[in-house]
Image (cartoon, coloured by chain):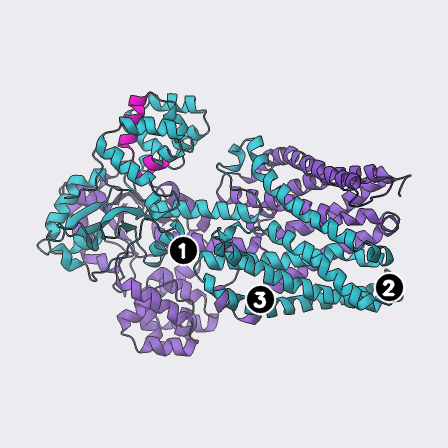
Chain colours: A purple, B cyan
């Protein structure tokens, strides 16, 4: 009844199977072992058990462990694994080993895995599994339930059933097991689907968009269909949950200015950790060197008005902070689909006044601080202290406004250039704002203090 | 068969019900209306339709709209809504209106909602719904399926069935609809549960821990039990998905230095936006004023060696960047449970050498830059330029090491003080590191340059 089925599909663990408790623990333990040791541990398990452990996404070293096995064993296990996980694991292997294993698989499994491997890992095609349940439009409730009972053990989920046209293989509707169980057995399944336009994903769809579909429609799985509406596979809610959490970790690390780690913090090697951090740190350092150049440019002004330098860290950091706020707001709004690329103009029209108001608030605080210190005798900013205070105040307005605008526009720019908007990090925004901030500050100083201090 | 059932429970929309497509859209549209207008729109719908729309978490103004309704209408709708959503919506109301509605509810519904409202919204108790399916230990597969068919329409999910002891009401095991459907009808349900120790949550459990349970065991729902193992409710995977995405947005915004927004970016009022940003910005600004004080403290050194000021922004930002990296890594590691409070020492022992190596890399680049500019004649750092270069290099090692250590320890400190570790923001870390960074830089300068420039 269903052609997209992997021949060797092994008994899948069901969602509530309590062996998972131990399987997840075991998978995590194996993740800490060297590949040979992990392969050895898998060799000592029954095939069924090894497959259950390999199927767990917690097992980070699965592909390295499989690469260490005898080819025949590797082929048996890969054939028995769930198709989506098997494709993920093979995708992490170097091309040579992967091709060696693929070559030994039976024709059908190889075709399935080749198909899945062709999609980018972050797309619906790369996340989907081919182990779903479909029935022809002509099926009755009783017939569908009988079919489900026969093939249940080889399917990822049986809670969503896809009704297809037997001629064209095109998806006609979806029905839930919930409805099948409560319906009259003699009823045709087609009558149970209320609308004839089921929610579907395309194989190219980004995993974030797939997650949005599943969330919005409270689905347990979403079918992935080609241009002819043939079901290629399904993405299940547990895969989406994992993908969302991974994506969150990746985004949080990138926003902090680190390349996303492949493994948990404490499992990342010291050198690996340095590599993930040094690259960005050096790139930011090199960009930030422009601040030294900017300062050199204003050297004579600096020498004449040392007082100005006292506020440089304060002013620069305020620009960076307002930029970081705006960037984090826009990255999330874009990720949630609350704001689209074409909304950049609306966002700019909000951030400009927001920046001016926030800058004015900080400017007022800054002026109050300088005046207070001067009056209370904590520090003497010299005879021109009101002008210094005005420079600091005006500088803050300019820099905070620039920070809010630049910080909010950066994610749009990245998206426009087809980068992930979430690659804009707080340190990156701060660096961007720092150099410009210095130039703004000194330019304002030149205008206000020219003829007196400068 | 199940006592924890809300009397008036209305036909719940099923997971794959395609009316959701329109309900979600409608809920979003209503979110943009004023409360009176939204209440008016709901008044024009059938009761069934209004309940479906109110049940959608996308409807952000649900509680304001209900507060605008005639009390009888409000009571009918609240009674018919799913219990977890009704409790969330009532929880957002002011106490007076909430109590007015609760007082008019039937005794059973009021008891259910009072119970749910007693739990913090971010706990398992605050997220759970009471509309689950339970059967006694004595039930057969056929009996359980018959029971499910009778009560299906009033349940949030029927895919997880809870087997309870009829005497004590204690949870004995769980079984999936999948297993029921494929099992022999005459078999006792108890035989279908492999282990007698089902995965459960306590009502106080944090939503992040609930999400971890559901992810780890690939569950569609997790039962929430009290100390006597009685099932109080269930948390379903779709609620967890929503909670995770909301939490992610909150964390990303806080890491960027903004208070979490309650509504989407473009729906937040201008003043609301300023309020969410000005607080942190002012707090950071006031703390950062310590940099001005530090600079004032070193004023005579600054006057003697202006060259030193050229590198202040460069050095300070490097400290902030390394701190932001470390903080983002540790926040995520703590959130994912990869690192626990007691691991702070292991983390410190990794971050210390990591900071030294990263600082040494940046220090080498910095020394190379100064030497190159000096040799190539781009800039003259004076006769003591090698000492200046050494100061910058040593300063970078000290500041980057301090940044990595302080940035990685901050989330632990916050967790220890019972704050959310994710309230550590990139701007906050940068500010923390800036002041200390200046002191480190000038102290190193005093040691290296004393007797020559200073």
Element at label 1: helix
Depth check: B81 or A161 in front?
B81
Task: Note whether B211 is above or below A11 in the view shown.
Answer: above
**Do the numbered discs 3 and 2 sit on residues whose CB atoms are within 8 Å?**
no
Q: Main secondary structure of the magenta part?
A: helix
Q: Chain of mark 2?
A: B
Circle 1 crowding by C-alpha within 10 Å: few under 14, some 14–19, many from 20: some
Q: Which residue is mark 2?
A: B453
Task: Note whether B410 is above or below A60 in the view shown.
Answer: above
**Do the numbered discs 3 and 1 sit on residues whose CB atoms are within 8 Å?**
no
At 44% from the left and 76% from the top, the residue drawn is A34
Q: Earlier in the sequence, mark 3 or mark 2?
A: 3
3 or 2: mark nearer the eye: 2
Quarter assignment of residue A62: bottom left
Task: Note whether A383 is above or below B164 in the view shown.
Answer: above
Which residue range is magenta in the image? B70-89
Q: Which residue is mark 1?
A: A242
* x, y percent for residue B157: 26, 44
3 or 1: mark nearer the eye: 3
1 or 2: mark nearer the eye: 2
């Amino acid at each position: 009844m269903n052609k997209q089925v992997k021949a060797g599909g092994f008994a899948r663990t069901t969602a509530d199977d309590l062996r998972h408790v131990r399987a997840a623990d075991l998978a995590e333990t194996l993740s800490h072992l060297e590949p040979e040791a992990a392969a050895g541990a898998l060799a000592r398990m029954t095939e069924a058990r090894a497959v259950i452990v390999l199927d767990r996404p917690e097992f980070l070293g699965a592909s390295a462990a499989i690469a260490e096995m005898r080819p025949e064993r590797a082929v048996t296990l890969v054939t028995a694994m769930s198709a989506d996980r098997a494709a993920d694991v093979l995708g992490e292997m170097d091309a040579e080993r992967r091709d060696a294993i693929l070559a030994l698989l039976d024709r059908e499994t190889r075709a399935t895995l080749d198909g899945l491997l062709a999609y980018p890992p972050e797309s619906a095609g790369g996340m989907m599994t081919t182990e779903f349940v479909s029935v022809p439009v002509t099926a009755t409730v009783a017939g569908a339930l009988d079919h489900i009972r026969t093939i249940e053990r080889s399917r990822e989920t049986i809670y969503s059933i896809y009704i297809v046209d037997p001629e064209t293989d095109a998806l006609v509707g979806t029905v839930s097991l919930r409805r099948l169980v409560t319906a009259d057995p003699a009823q045709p399944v087609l009558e149970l689907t209320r609308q004839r336009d089921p929610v579907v994903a395309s194989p190219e769809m980004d995993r974030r968009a797939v997650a949005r579909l599943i969330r919005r429609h409270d689905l347990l799985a979403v079918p992935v269909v080609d241009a002819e509406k043939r079901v290629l596979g399904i993405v299940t809610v547990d895969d989406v949950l994992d993908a969302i959490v991974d994506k969150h970790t990746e985004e949080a690390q990138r926003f902090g200015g680190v390349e996303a780690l492949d493994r948990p913090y404490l499992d990342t090697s010291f050198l690996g950790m340095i590599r993930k951090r040094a690259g960005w740190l050096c790139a930011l350092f090199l960009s930030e060197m422009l601040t030294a150049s900017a300062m050199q440019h204003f050297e004579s002004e600096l020498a004449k008005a040392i007082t100005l330098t006292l506020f440089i860290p304060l002013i620069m950091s305020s620009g960076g902070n307002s930029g970081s706020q705006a960037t984090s707001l826009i990255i999330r709004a874009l990720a949630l689909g609350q704001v689209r690329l074409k909304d950049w103009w609306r966002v700019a029209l909000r951030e400009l006044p927001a920046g001016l108001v926030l800058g004015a608030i900080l400017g007022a605080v800054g002026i109050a601080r300088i005046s207070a210190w001067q009056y209370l005798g904590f520090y003497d900013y010299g005879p021109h202290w009101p002008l210094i205070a005005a420079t600091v105040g005006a500088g803050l307005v300019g820099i905070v406004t620039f920070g809010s605008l630049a910080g909010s526009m950066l994610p749009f720019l990245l998206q426009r250039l087809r980068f992930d908007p979430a690659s804009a990090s707080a340190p990156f925004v701060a660096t961007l704002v720092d150099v410009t901030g210095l130039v703004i500050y000194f330019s304002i100083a030149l205008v206000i203090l020219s003829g007196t201090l400068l």
